[in-house]
Amino acid sequence: MRAVVVAILVILVAVGGLLAWRAQRPAEPVTLYLAVPMGVFVPLNQAMERFTALHPNVEFKTMVDTPEMMAQAVEDNEEKPDIFISPGGHEATVLAEKGFIDPSSMVAFGSYEVAILVPRGNPGRIQEPADLLNPEVKLISFSPPDLTAASHAARQSLQNLGLWEKIEPRVRVTGCCNESFQWVVDGRAEANVQFVGCPMDTKSVDLSRQKAEIACILPRASYYVPRTVVGILTTTKQRRLAEEFVAFLTSPEMLASLPKLRNDQNLPLSPGPWGPQQEAGPARAAGS
């Protein structure tokens, strides 16, 4: 009988030791793959560092590029990110329409304004959107407006202002937003459209040393409100972890602690939904 009791105690001690070892053993590492546009990498990297401090087993892998190149990679590459981040929202909307992003997962925060950029010295004499019709303006560089959020918003604005059809013959579409910006830097175009702060960050860059300058801001009421949009890929194998990170990133407390995130239209810090309804924008004025 005593031998039986001893044997049971030995087994209990062994089981208890195994459970304690499992409780203390670090969780298996897991990787979360993010597509992060260059313009928001710094604040997003801060959020990733804070998340891994709370979840030491989580490792982040990032694809950092222009929004257009990231969207193309999602379509073309066999290995796809778990989360896609769009500065302005339209890239995420396009990927959702093609089935790559779950529309119900998309969350929006922050906000942007759209600017007309010109070469230093403003050879086209642009002071307001209507000046894009000046005879000195020969070329206006755009990244693809059917994909790039900044160009999509700019085209919507110019349509609502009654200018798009008039300037469209002067528009040249380049491969990506960086390339279109380079056209005004080297003087090939008299105007370019970008979000304020990308690539010319008025909050942290000495614009006097740049080869381009902001001529004017497009009227806010003439286009939808572009926002930073986070969406989860339909192909992810880390859906639960991706949802946890998105909730962490878009909490008002986190957004308030990441000052480099743009919120140029001073929207509430609480995140909002995203989809075609948010991109619809104002109705075109009658007769414009």
Image (cartoon, rainbow, N blue to C red):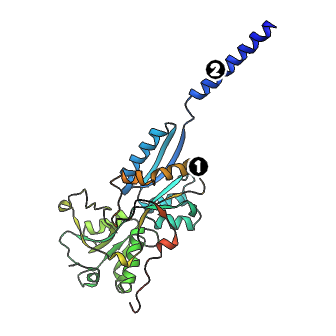
Residue placed most toward the observer, 271 or 103: 271
Q: Position of residue 213 (x, y in %)?
A: 23, 67
From this viewpoint, which residue is outermost toward the bottom? 287
Residue placed most toward the observer, 154 or 183: 154
Q: Position of residue 222 (x, y in %)?
A: 37, 79
Q: Toward which corner of the image does residue 192 lie, by quadrant?
A: bottom left
Q: Which residue is depicted at the point 78% across and 7% down?
A: 3
Q: Relative to 7, is 216 on the left or the right?
A: left
Per the model, the C-alpha gap separating discs 2 and 1 is 31 Å
From this viewpoint, which residue is outermost toward the right? 1
Element at label 2: helix
Element at label 1: helix
Which residue is the site of mark 2? 17
| Amino acid on which the number 1 mark rests in the picture | Arg
Q: Nearer the viewer, mark 2 or mark 1?
A: 2
Q: Toward which corner of the image does residue 12 lie, by quadrant?
A: top right
Question: The C terminus is located in which quarter?
Answer: bottom left
Dot 2 or dot 1: first in sequence order is: 2
Q: Which mark is residue 15?
A: none
Q: Which residue is depicted at the point 44% across and 38% down?
A: 53
Above-or-below relation of 164 to 230? below
Q: Relative to 22, is 133 on the left or the right?
A: left
Q: Position of residue 220 (x, y in %)?
A: 34, 75
Which residue is the site of mark 1? 240
Above-or-below relation of 112 to 250? below
